[in-house]
Image: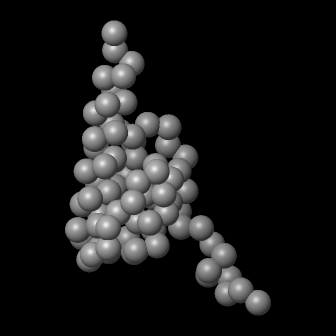
Amino acid sequence: MANMEEEQVNPILLEFLDTDSFEEKYKILVATPTMDFDNLLIDNMASSIDVVIEDGDIESRLQDLKVCVRTRAKYETTRFRR
C-alpha cells in the first residue's frame, strides 16, 4: 500500500500547473525558496512545459528551469502583439 505522503501532490507544482502564463510560472519559481525544490519537482515542472532540464545540483537545475520559463514568458508577450 502506498504511503499517504507519496500520494499527495506538491502544492507548488499544483500552483505552477494552474497558472495560464509563463510570467506567472516564473513568479512562482522566484518566490519559492530553493530548499522547497527537489529533482522530482523540477522534472515535473519541466515536463509540464515540454522541456528537459539536465542533471546537476538543485540550484543549477532550478536556474536552468527559470531561464526556460523566462524565455517562454518573453515570447508569450511578444506573440500577442501585432
The residue at the far bottom in this view is 1
| Residue 8 image-quadrant placement | bottom right
Q: Position of residue 41 (x, y in %)?
A: 45, 68
What residue appears at the point 44 percent right and 66 percent down from the top-left corner?
A: 43
Q: Residue at x 39, y 18 (%)?
A: 80
Please report the residue visible at 28 percent of the width from the left and 33 percent of the height from the top.
Answer: 74
Q: Residue at x 71, y 86 (%)?
A: 2
Q: Note whether 29 is above or below 38 in the view shown.
A: above
> In this view, which residue lies farthest toward the right?
1
Give the camera-side residue of 57 and 18.
57
Location of residue 9 with respect to 45 vertically, above or below: below
Quarter containing the C terminus: top left
Farthest-out residue, top? 82
69 sits to left or right of 8: left
Count the marks: how many? Answer: 0
**Would you identify the image quadrant in which residue 72 lies?**
top left
Q: Quadrant of the N terminus?
A: bottom right
Q: Position of residue 39 (x, y in %)?
A: 40, 74
Observer-nearest of 53 and 44: 53
- Tell me residue 7's x, y (percent): 66, 76
Q: Estimate the x, y position of residue 55 in percent, counting from the top left.
A: 32, 73
Asked which colour scheme the image uses, the reply is one colour
| Residue 81 showing in the rendered view | yes
